[in-house]
Image (cartoon, helix red, strand yellow):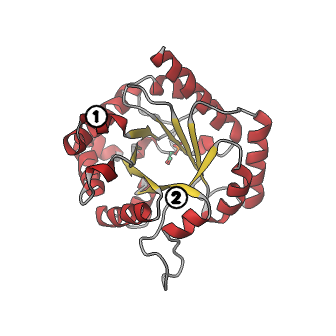
Amino acid sequence: MKKRPFVAGNWKMNMTVPMTRAWFEEWLRLSPGPEDAEMVVCPPYTSLWEAARRSTGTGIWLGAQNLYWEEAGAFTGEVSGPMLADAGCRYVIIGHSERRQYFGETEATVQKRIAAAIRAGLRPIVCVGETLPQREAGQTLEVIQAQLEGGLSGFTGETIGGFIFAYEPVWAIGTGRTATPEQAQEVHQAVRGRLAQKIGKPAAGCVIILYGGSVKPSNAYDLFRKPDIDGFLVGGASLEAAPFAEIVKESIRAYYKEVN
Ligand code: 13P
C-alpha cells in the first residue's frame, strides 16, 4: 500500500547560518501549510541549531548528515548521536555515497553508525547505490544487496523495521541524470524483497525506501507513482525552499492519485 510521502533535503556542505535563516523565511512565505507528508531537512552541523529554532511549527523535521559511533570523548572533529538528538535531530543520513567515496566509509563503519543512531533515538536513513561502471557491468542488484547486507547484519527485525533506506545511484547524484522511474522501481523492489526475507513481508511493506539522484519538481510525480518509491532524498533542489516545496507537492499529488 502506498505510504504518505517522505521527502528529505540533504544540504550537504552548503548553507551558512544566514542562508538557513533565509531558507526558513522563504518556506514560511510560501506557507505550504500542514502538508500530508513527512518533511525533513539535513543541514550541516553548523546550521543545525538555527534550523532547529526556525523549523518549529513549520512541519519540517531535522536530520544530520553523519554521526560518530562513540558518545563522547577524545575524538577531535567528530559529532555523536546524543549531540545530534540534543540539537533537535530526529533522523541521520548514514553511508551516503559521498562518504563512501571520499571519507573511507565501509560496511563495517556504516553498521557502527547505525547502531549509534539507534542508541541515541535517531532514525537512520541508510544509503545504497551503484556507480556507473557497476551499472554498465550489470552488477547493480549485486552491489545493492552487498551494501544492504552490511547495513542489516547484526540488527533484529524490529529494529530494521524503523530504518529508512535511500537508493541513490551514484551516476545520478548531482549530474542532472535521473534514474528512470522503471530503473528506480527495479532496485526499490529488490531492496524490499530482501527486507521481506529478513523481517517478513508485512514489516518490509512498511519500511520507507527513498530515491535520490537529481530529483526535481519535474520528475518527482512520475517517480512517486511507482509502488516501491516512498519519497525522496533531495540534494541540489533542496537548497532553495521553493523547489523543495514543489517536490513535496508533486509527491502528495502522486500519492492521492494512487490512493484514490
Ligand atoms: P542531487 O539531488 O543533487 O542529485 O543529490 C542527491 C543526493 O545525494 C541526496 O543525498
Q: Residue drawn 43% across and 75% down?
A: 70
The vertical placement of 142 against 20, above or below, is above
Residue closer to the observer: 209 or 132: 209
Q: Residue drawn 41% across and 27% down?
A: 181
Which callout, 1 or 2, points at the residue further toward the start of the chain?
2
Is residue 163 toward the left or the right of residue 156 in the image?
right
Q: Which residue is mark 1?
A: 202
Counting from the top left corner in percent of width and height, residue 45 is at: 61, 64
The disc placed on residue 65 is 2
Cα–Cα gap, marks 1 and 2 = 29 Å
Badge 1 element: helix
Residue mark closest to the camera, 1 vs 2: 1
Q: Residue drawn 74% across and 47% down?
A: 24
Q: Quadrant of residue 50?
A: bottom right
Q: Residues within 10 Å of mark 2 (few under 14, many from 20)?
A: many
Counting from the top left corner in percent of width and height, residue 220 is at: 53, 28
Badge 2 element: loop
Is residue 205 toward the left or the right of residue 27 in the image?
left
Give the residue type at disc 1. Answer: Pro
Residue closer to the observer: 133 or 65: 65
